[in-house]
Amino acid sequence: MKKLITSFIVVIPMMIIMAQPPRGDMDKGYRKSMKTMSIWKLTEELELTEEQAEKFFPKFRSHQDKMEKLRNEGKDALKPIFETLKDGKDVSDKDLDAAIKKFEKLEREKVENQITFVKSLKGTLTNTQRAKLMLAPHKMRREAKDNIKKHKKSKNRRQKRDRW
């Protein structure tokens, strides 16, 4: 009987731990749902027709892939500095200058890609839709920030209500 109880005590927590998805998978799922949500909001904001959507989304996906690649390169460029600071060491002038140059180059590429992308949509979208496309990321960030503020306020109100 003791062996049975001991085995349950050992096996059940292991089963629970093994049932949890790996952390990286959760991040990927979260990112995927965020991308889906942003595409939905963008489609709604731009009021795309079916013909426009057929032409726009392949270009949009290609552009998003390029931007993701540049973001990843930026993260990789800053990793040595991050590791140096994490170890509690001082960052050398050489390392910082190299990181700044790489960061500047990548930011320029991002801006150039964004401008080229919007210009390439001239025959696909109307001028109003292209203007909305340029403003959409700022609008989405502002809405997300407002939603977070509302959530925090409602959470604080709930905590005050639940107190004695």
Image (spheres, helix red, strand yellow):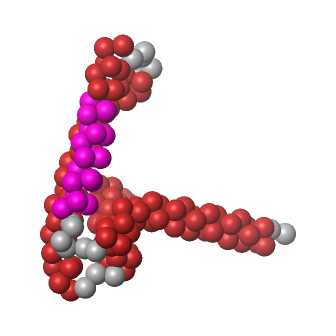
**Which residue: 41% across, 63% down?**
135
Residue 81 magenta: no
Q: Position of residue 111 (x, y in %)?
A: 29, 47
Q: Residue at x 62, y 63 (%)?
A: 149
Query: In front here: 151 or 162?
Result: 151
Q: Residue 55: where, in percent of width, then height?
A: 15, 75
The residue lying at 45 percent from left, 65 percent from top is 140
How many numbered marks appear? 0
Measuring from the top left, give residue 128's x and y in whole percent.
35, 72
Indicate left or right for 113 with 141 as reference: left
Query: In the shown orientation, is residue 10 left or right of residue 117?
Result: right
Asked where in the image residue 161 lies, by quadrant, the reply is bottom right
Magenta residues, dominant SS class? helix
Seen as rendered, the residue at the extreme right is: 164
Q: Can you see residue 55?
A: yes
Q: Is residue 20 above or below residue 70?
A: below
Answer whether residue 103 is magenta in the image. Answer: yes
Q: Along the line of sight, which residue is nearer the eye, 34 or 20?
A: 34
Q: Nearer the viewer, residue 92 or 63?
A: 63
* Image quadrant in which you'd find residue 125: bottom left
Picture quarter with the N terminus: bottom left
Quadrant location, the C terminus? bottom right
Horizontal arrangement in the rendering, residue 68 relative to residue 8 (left or right): left
Residue 7 appears in the rendering: no
Q: Which residues are magenta?
A: 102-120
